[in-house]
Image: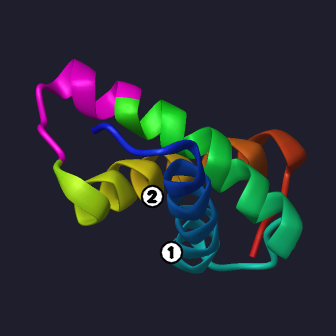
Amino acid sequence: MYHSFIGWVLIGLIAGWLGGKVTRGKGFGLLANLFLGLVGAVIGGWIFGRLGVESFGFIGGLAAATVGAVVLVGIGRLLAGAHD
C-alpha cells in the first residue's frame, strides 16, 4: 500500500466518514470522525498486515482505513459511553 501523503489523507478522510456511517448513532461529529479516519488508516493498515490481508490501490487502502476507522470509532464510543 504505497500512496502519496495526500492520497493517504484523502483515504483517511473518506474512511472516517464511512466509519461514522457504518457505526451509526450520534458519534463524535464529522470532524472527530474524519480525524479517527486518518488515524484509522494507519491502524487498518497494521490490522491488515497482521492478518496477512493484501490491499492494493485506492480501494484496498480505503478498505483497510475504513476497518481501522470503524475500530477506533467503536472504541471511542465505548470509552466515551456514547449509546444509541
Whichever of callouts 1 and 2 sits on the residue coming sooner in the sequence is 1
Classify the position of the C terminus by image quarter: bottom right
Residue at point 77% right, 52% down?
Answer: 35
Tell me where residue 57 sits by quadrant: bottom left
Residue 1 screen position, x and y as percent: 28, 38
* The residue stretch that appears in magenta: 46-55
Amino acid at dot 1? Val
- From the image, state whether disc 1 or disc 2 is nearer to you: 2
Residue under label 2 = 66
Q: Is residue 73 visible?
A: no
Residue under label 1 = 22
Q: Main secondary structure of the magenta part?
A: helix
**Disc number placed over residue 38 in the picture, else none:** none
Q: Residue furthest top?
A: 50
In the rendered structure, the answer to whether residue 46 lies left or right of residue 54 reads: right
Residue 49 forms part of the magenta stretch: yes
